[in-house]
Image: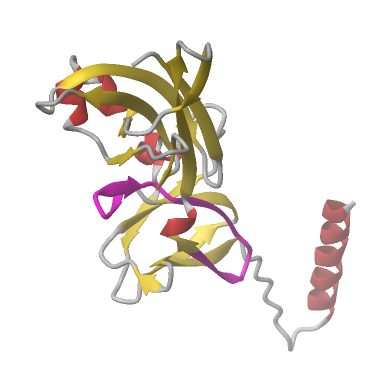
């Protein structure tokens, strides 16, 4: 129906034009819009980072950081943390950033945006919104009570899936740790980490000389933005 009405409208304009030799009519159909983005860490601008413009893809098949080869444009954030794109064809896009380093951690924020005909649309990304939480509880078996109880003094190390699988022994893996905590009386430690990444945890104790006495490791899986992953290690130290 919309196409039919458009055709009828154009026909009417052409009819008016044909009846008058003194007036000219111009029809402009805009098929593009403009996009701009402001990138911050909380309220501080992120300067000098690349933002990729990528046509919308199927998230069930690809992650944003794996489809940069499909980028149709990229810009570098200015001193205000902003980038702007000129005329962009109407449609849905991802604005993607890769490996934004903050405190030794790497963030991969992305945002689904829409280019609307004849409109300058502005978006914002706070890199710190792209985090999730991992909570790990260590419980050790008590042979007197025959129960698992919270364990104090265990070291819990977090590393990425990639770093874990690229190492062959625990000593080497622990050099790739991005965060480590020691359990207290509750046996629980909590980590806030960049989302969009898969993680492993290593739980271990050391002997009097500081060497690793025993250890356990587990794959925690992919951490999504805003997700809280809760894992329990049942140990026998």
Residue 117 can be seen, yes or no: yes
Q: Nearer the viewer, residue 202 or 58?
A: 202
* Residue reaching furthest to the bottom: 22
Q: Position of residue 22 (x, y in %)?
A: 74, 89
Q: Position of residue 179 (x, y in %)?
A: 29, 41
Q: Does 47 lie within the magenta span?
A: no
Q: Which range is magenta? A: 99-124
Q: Does 113 lie within the magenta span?
A: yes
Q: Is residue 7 left or right of residue 60?
A: right
Q: Position of residue 4 (x, y in %)?
A: 87, 53
Q: Position of residue 214 (x, y in %)?
A: 26, 16
Q: Is residue 101 left or right of residue 68?
A: left
Find residue 60 and report its image quarter: top right
* Residue reaching furthest to the front: 144
Where is 213 relative to 46, above or below?
A: above
Q: Is residue 195 left or right of residue 26?
A: left
Please, what is the dominant secondary structure of the magenta stretch?
A: strand
Residue at image location 39% in from the left, 46% down from the top: 108
Q: Nearer the viewer, residue 105 or 172?
A: 172
Residue at image location 32% in from the left, 38% down from the top: 182
Q: Nearer the viewer, residue 48 or 204?
A: 204
Where is 88 relative to 27, above or below?
A: above
Residue at image location 53% in from the left, 50% down from the top: 93
Where is 217 relative to 124, above or below?
A: above
Residue at image location 71% in from the left, 79% down from the top: 25
């Amino acid at each position: 129906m919309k196409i039919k009405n458009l055709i009828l409208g154009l026909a009417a304009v052409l009819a008016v034009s044909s009846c008058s030799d003194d007036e000219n009519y111009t029809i402009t159909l805009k098929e593009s819009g403009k996009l701009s983005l402001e990138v911050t860490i909380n309220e501080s601008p992120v300067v000098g980072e690349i933002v990729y413009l990528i046509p919308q893809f199927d998230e069930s098949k690809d992650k944003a950081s794996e489809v940069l080869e499909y980028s149709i444009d990229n810009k570098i954030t200015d001193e205000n943390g902003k980038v702007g794109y000129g005329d962009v064809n109407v449609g849905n896009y991802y604005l993607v950033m890769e490996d934004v380093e903050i405190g030794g951690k790497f963030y991969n924020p992305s945002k689904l945006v829409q280019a609307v005909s004849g409109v300058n649309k502005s978006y914002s990304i706070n890199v710190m919104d792209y985090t999730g939480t991992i909570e790990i509880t260590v419980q050790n078996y008590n042979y007197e009570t025959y129960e698992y109880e919270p364990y104090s003094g265990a070291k819990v190390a977090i590393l990425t899936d990639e770093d874990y699988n690229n190492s062959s022994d625990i000593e080497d893996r622990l050099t790739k740790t991005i965060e480590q905590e020691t359990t207290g009386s509750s046996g629980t430690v909590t980590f806030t980490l960049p989302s969009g990444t898969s993680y492993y945890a290593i739980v271990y104790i050391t002997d009097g000389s500081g060497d690793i006495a025993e250890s356990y490791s587990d794959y925690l899986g992919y951490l999504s933005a805003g997700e809280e992953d809760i894992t329990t290690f049942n140990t026998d130290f």
